Amino acid sequence: MRTLVARLDSDGDVLLAGPAVRAAAAAGEVVLLCGPSGVRAAELLPGVTRIVEWECPWIANPAPDVRPVDIEAVTALVRGIRADVALILTSFHQSPLPLALVLRLAGVPKIVARSVDYPGSLLDVRLRDDPDVPEAQRALEVARAAGFDVSDSRLAIIELPRTELSRPYVVVHPGASAPARTWSPDRWAKAVVALTAAGYRVVVTGGPAEADLTEHVAGACGTDLGGRTSFRELAGVLAGADAVVVGNTGPAHLAAAVGTPVVSLFAPVVPASRWAPHGKHVLLGDQNAPCRDSRARECPVPGHPCLDLVEPADVVAAVAQVITGVTS
């Protein structure tokens, strides 16, 4: 059997699709259709036979133009995959139906997805949504509806590279693709100072575009690895850490996938019930703040109060809690 699994957004979303991918892989080949911002995570997922990259104009942000030639090209590409079944994995605010139309035109014989809207003949199996189901579980339920065994719900990635960092250390990852989903830079910098004063060695991580941010946050206390690791190497750094302090962004899920506990600075612009780290974690931030469920990329409330009312001392206490399991 050959299964096409589609998850067209970011690295964190693709990591949360991992259990569904493994369920399908237990029955045969898996071709993963993902967007450019999800390829790095796709390369780490066990069970993926082939990765097909496509920038989907109704998922990507910022969105590319919809061009007939691109839709014709991806339709032909999917036709050539010759999938027996397709799983379309989406978040609660995304519709699977445009992609289902493409897959139907490409001749995919069985298409399974969640859909709030009436799918007509576009879906063979339609699941309704549930507002309280974590994102990884939502994907697994799509796999179950397609007939796959979904007994393993853990996040996981392939074998990790060894990190040269000496242990112990705590990782602080201050960046996020949406500014509303992370702490303010000065707060992160103060947290590094507070963690160092509490006796922790702090390693600050980030992508190449975040080098200025990580340098500021690391200051004189932290070790700055901003822009110095690939996504796979970052996984190795996170795996060696005693804890990871991070906003609501892909590395939070990468930390969960390598089994490292997470202190999550979680803004309620999306629900924690769906997007909190899929493993041992402590959640910080006011989950009932006025920005709740707004899906805002930039904080709509002056002062970013949902997170900026969190104190560096709260982070130190949460790190101690996830490491030792003891509350202060």
Image: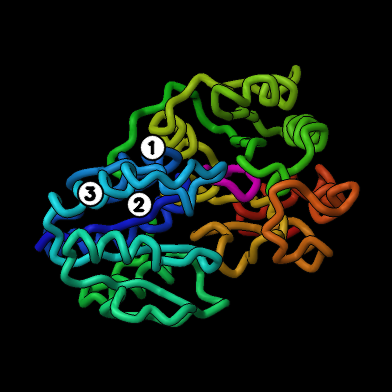
Q: How is the image coloured?
A: rainbow
Classify mark 2: helix, strand or loop.
Answer: loop
The quadrant of the image that shows the C terminus is: bottom right
Where does the image place residue 179, in percent across and percent down from the top left?
71, 42
Where does the image place residue 6, in percent across and percent down from the top left?
33, 56
Classify mark 1: helix, strand or loop.
Answer: helix
Numbered range of the magenta stretch: 243-251
- Is 188 positioned to the left or the right of 153 in the image? right
Which of the two labelled residues, at mark 2 and mark 1, occupies the earlier sequence position?
1
Residue 243, above or below 111: above
> For residue 199: magenta?
no
- Is 162 positioned to the left or the right of 229 in the image? left
Instruction: Compute the Cα span from label 3 to label 1.
Output: 13 Å
- Residue 156 bears which disc, if any? 2
Which residue is the site of mark 3?
48
- Residue 202 bears which disc, if any? none
Which residue is the site of mark 1?
40
Classify mark 3: helix, strand or loop.
Answer: loop
Q: Residue furthest front?
A: 68
